[in-house]
Amino acid sequence: MADFVSTRRDGSVAIIIVDNPPVNALRQEVRAGLKDHFAAAAQDKTVEAIVLACAGRTFIAGADISEFGKPMAPPGLSDVIEVMENIKKPTVAAIHGTALGGGLETALGCHFRVAAPSARLGLPEVKLGILPGAGGTQRTPRLVGLEKAMTMIVSGEPIPAKDALASGLVDEIVEGDLTAGAVAFARKALAEKRPLVRVRDRTVEPVDAAKLDELTASLLKRARGLHAPAAAAKAVRWTLDVPFDEGLRRERDTFLELVRGDQSKAQRHIFFAEREAAKVLDMPKDTKAREIKRAAVIGAGTMGGGIAMCFANAGIPVTVVEAAQDALDRGLGIIKKNYQSTVARGGLKQEDMDRRVGLIQGTTDFGAVKDADIVVEAAFEEMALKKKIFGDLDRLTKKDAVLATNTSYLDVNEIARATNRPGAVLGMHFFSPANVMRLLEIVRGAQTAPDVLSTAIDVGRKIGKVPAVVGVCHGFVGNRMLRVRGIEAERLLLEGALPQDVDGALTGFGFPMGPFAMGDLAGLDVGYRVRKALGERNEIADTLVEQGRHGQKTGRGFYIYEAGSRTPTPDPEVEKLIVDTAARLGVKRRTIGREEILERLLYPMINEGARILEEGIAMRPGDIDVVWVYGYGWPVWTGGPMFHADLVGLAKIRDRLAAFAKQSGDKTLEPAPLLARLAGEGRTFASLAAK
Ligand code: 3HC
């Protein structure tokens, strides 16, 4: 068996090394190894000081998340840390890469910490629906103060080494060889007879209670719907009220309660699903991504501009191509304005903005695509136009350029056939605003070459996106499911609900906004055009558009928006339109409860998700969850539609869908064969193997 923990010597300094690739997670063997090796070094009379270092790309990145939810095999991490912190010889953690969660808690079991300049340190447990469970909430405030600890623990955001040095979380930054620097630090501590103070014995500096309350409230505002951040904030405060050991005990109890809860299960599911979603099972092992040095974006509209920003933010030079000079100027102007507002908010330094803007070039010369290694087309959503563009790209781009379309609905295979190299074509579907939203649906065409697919995944990661690989169908995964929700939302209006009832049910569930407020934000004319092209009609939404009510941009849509405001106000005229339309269509309106509204909106989506799985459009149920959590605001603490379905129980969903189908006469609401089969067998979506 591999040595997860080993000790080597540098004179009288013992260097204990953790080696558990890829991220040195604290699996049971690592915990046991650390305990044994620290105890042995403590006993060994020839050892005067101890350095804890890690092999590979990072310091310990935390507990092994895959062990959560299973019975914990001893020793617990707190037991390991207890052994470490009671050693009467200087102990120094040497941190490179990321010291996260249990990793940072382990480092807090040492007397001292040194770090590489590029290291990052944090307690991201809240992102997994838990709180630090091995003393993090009790030790961190004793070292860095309550306010800093509160921010780190409640936000879960790691801090860079420089910041850690300033706040006292690390004692020194080591340029050059980190382990050698840590050994030198240990020797200096010995020579100077530095006092060996356990972090637990330090006193918490008192703070202004009102200021701390204000800080906590502002941190928790961003954690709407989540249980863990509030529990973590409470735990940090115990450092003021109870002795260390009592704080530790309470922290442990809260950790165990949270880790067993559905929120944490859901967030852990998303952690792993996010990493799986870009893994393509039939990708040949030796596939190599193509090198991307320069990008081009076709179209300087909202999407094109946002996509160009993504490349520039990642340091990739990008050329924006637009047909008319005025449209190009407008697009580039908006990009600049977006950056300026981030600078004004303090989110970006002026020099970084200048560098990014400098990476974006605009042109009306289509021939400029010749230098690009990847082209993302973000032109108007029209097949004829896209085919013309791809025909031109085929003639004008380098032989090995990757040609991507940002279409949200259209057939990527048909677009690919407009070229003589369909293997180079695929979809890269960004979500608005493209420079903010994390999801990137990568649409694999029938002929997309493996290395082209691999390049898109690689680029997606480089530009900070969460790539999810999906197949070709109308609307792919996200918009296809959104469409069925939209149909049901309109039906609910006719049957008795109002826009604010439908939207309220979804925001109550955890979405940032419901379909009608979202439609108003995006512009109701967008969906109108899509439906028209398909020969479909949405009685209420389409009438609104025909009345000139396009949403926020016209001050009126499903709601009214007072001048300059983004706050939706219900409109009696819309209510009248709904009531009249229902009467005209002979639909009898009734009171519909919030629970029924939710079921009617969410279950058809899950049903469509089952069809998407059956057709192989998504490889795994988790891929669908990733699409909805990162692209459409599905609340992460419910784990996405398919994970949520498993929690609700597939039999219940099957039965409700069957009832909805009967009641409405809409056969598409009948349970999908896969859903019916799994429900019948008492199984879950999670039990399916990927395909
Ligand atoms: N446990 C188990 N597996 C982990 C893991 C962990 N803590 N962290 C990462 N992995 C796995 C990933 O699933 C991935 O597996 P795969 O290759 O099979 O897909 C592999 O390690 C590499 O991870 P990434 O692809 O994420 O690699 P990056 O280099 O992009 O990022 C990282 C590295 C920043 C460390 C990132 O993986 C990360 O944020 N990990 C989670 C860190 C974390 O949340 N730690 C706290 C855990 S909870 C805890 O410690 C509780 C304690 O208080 C008791």
Image (cartoon, helix red, strand yellow):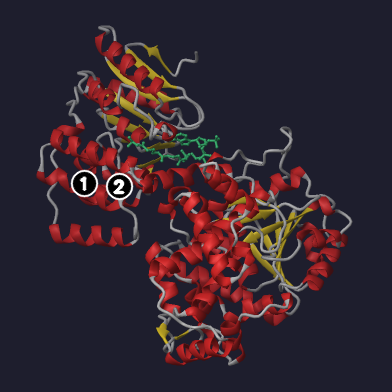
| Residue on which disc 1 sits | 236
Quadrant position of residue 375: bottom right
Callout 2 touching callout 1 (CB < 8 Å):
yes
Q: Amino acid at mark 1?
A: Val
Where is residue 675 shown, x and y percent of the image?
Answer: 58, 50
Farthest residue in the top direction? 45
Q: Give the answer, above or below, for where 370 lies relative to 554.
A: above
In the visual, does 501 lie left or right of 434? left
Q: Which mark is residue 183?
A: none
Q: Give the answer, above or below, for where 213 lies relative to 252.
A: below
Q: Residues within 10 Å of mark 2 (few under 14, many from 20)?
A: many
| Residue on which disc 2 sits | 153
Q: What is the C-alpha distance between the residues marked 2 and 1?
A: 8 Å
Q: Amino acid at mark 2?
A: Ile
Where is residue 346 shown, x and y percent of the image?
Answer: 40, 64
The residue at 39%/71% (across/down) is 593
Q: Nearer the viewer, residue 607 or 46?
A: 607
